[in-house]
Amino acid sequence: RESLEGRAKELEGRLAERDAEVGERDATIASLESRAAALEDDLARQRERMDEDREAEAGRLNATIDELRERLRAEEEGLRTAGLASACKVKELEDIIARGIEERRRMHEIIQELRGNVRVYARIRPFLPGDGLPPGDSTSFVSAGTGSTVHVARPGDPSEHEFKFDRVFDQSAGQDCVYEEVSGLVTSALDGYNVVLFTYGQTGSGKTHTLQGTGTGEMRGMIPRCIEQIATHKSAIEADGWSFRMEASFLEIYQEKIRDLLRVSPDEKTTHEIKVGSDGRRTVTNLAVKALDPTDQEAVDAVLSLAAKRRSTGSTDMNATSSRSHSVFSLEVLATSPGGQAVRGRLHLCDLAGSERLDRSNATGVAASETKSINKSLSSLADVFTAIGQRASFVPFRNSKLTYLLQPALSGSGKMCMFVNVSPTEASVQSPLRDESKQVRVGESYAHCRDYRVMQNGRGDEEGS
């Protein structure tokens, strides 16, 4: 018995030593985690300070450009009045303005790269009358956390799932607040870059509202707001002697077939294919391309109204007017200086078809086939983002019409932004999180792509073609 008691004491001593070692290791881990969090906070502050400095410098450049413009106009008026107009002096001032504009573009590009050529935002929509909530019940199963996180709570699951984005817009965020985040990317398109803005999420999560909005007031979406920004830009550069031209096209990709949303006849059966020119520019055959003056609101409204009538929608249990296709509204802008310098850029605004599960949408027949095609296409999009993020030697752009069409904006110096639209309802998180939230895979693949996107600069549009 004494031997057993001695053995027990020995084991208790060894156990105490192990507990002490574990305690020391836990303390070390906690210290390292604290240091890592502090370093992350410091890095975030450094980036914010750099961003603010660049913004301030860009503001000073814009003020200088405006001052030079006024000087030029005053100089011209003075010389005209005196009858001593001097082409040499005017040319000198024009050259100064041109250099200022070029420097402004360079600074803007630096600012956009600091913010990220690939950005992922989340937008949580508010509850709607059609959500079927009992009176007085406004329990949200999706909420914005501190900073840039989204918290998802499932019924019956005590744990919360957290997802991180570049920024999160909660239920109170208005359309103006959302557009403020992407206006810089519209400027990049005007500066000659290929840019694509996506809205993505489950059926009924608010994608089309974010992109198109309603009416002409505060509820208007990104498309009408970006056209307003382009109109302002057009007026400004034309005052400096530049010429400006904008062309618009609007198509949908329905079950991997391209349809022209600006076609004259609603029953037109024209076949459309994506072609790549020797300069790498992509065009779609037999597609209506309309010259559009962004300052002509009536003409803009007519184009958007026609496209809305042609868009493929259908009713499912998740949404009475569910978009059954991806729509791509493309604007190509060309500005030419008095000296012949041309700046050409493209802006794509893409409303992705709503992702949904067959067991929730209760789609059958053609609708079920549409749902399968939509989910397959979204998986292809995620595959492209994953390949770019992993710096793969081959990127499967050709696996879907959507990624092949948008390849110039998804590679090289192109710029991308995705809004992951989220519904706050219980029904949207009822199923297992991994299966229900297909948007999580696309969003995470997109974020992974963002982390390594700078590696694509210089790989060009030939990647994966």
Image (tube, rainbow, N blue to C red):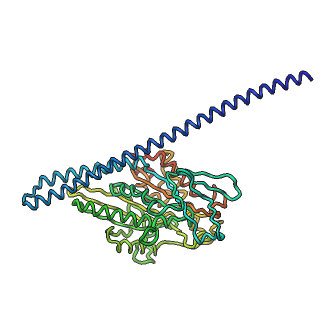
Q: How many marks?
A: 0
Q: Residue at x 44, y 62 (%)?
A: 176
Q: Is residue 439 left or right of residue 416?
A: right
Give the x, y percent position of residue 426: 65, 63
Residue at the left extreme of this rendering: 83
Give the x, y percent position of residue 128: 57, 69
Question: Where's the N terminus, which quadrant?
Answer: top right
**Up/down of 225 relative to 108, above or below:** below
Residue 377 visible (yes or no): no
Q: Is residue 20 left or right of residue 318?
A: right
**Quarter where residue 251 is shown:** bottom left
Q: Nearer the viewer, residue 422 or 16?
A: 16
Residue at the right extreme of this rendering: 1
Give the x, y percent position of residue 257: 48, 67
Q: Is residue 226 left or right of residue 29?
A: left
Q: Nearer the viewer, residue 31 or 115?
A: 31
Give the x, y percent position of residue 304: 41, 71
Q: Residue at x 66, y 70 (%)?
A: 134
Q: Residue at x 56, y 60 (%)?
A: 422
Residue at the front extreme of this rendering: 136
Q: Is residue 333 left or right of residue 315?
A: left
**Quarter where residue 357 is shown:** bottom right
Residue 264 visible (yes or no): yes
Q: Residue at x 62, y 56 (%)?
A: 152
Q: Nearer the viewer, residue 54 or 263?
A: 54
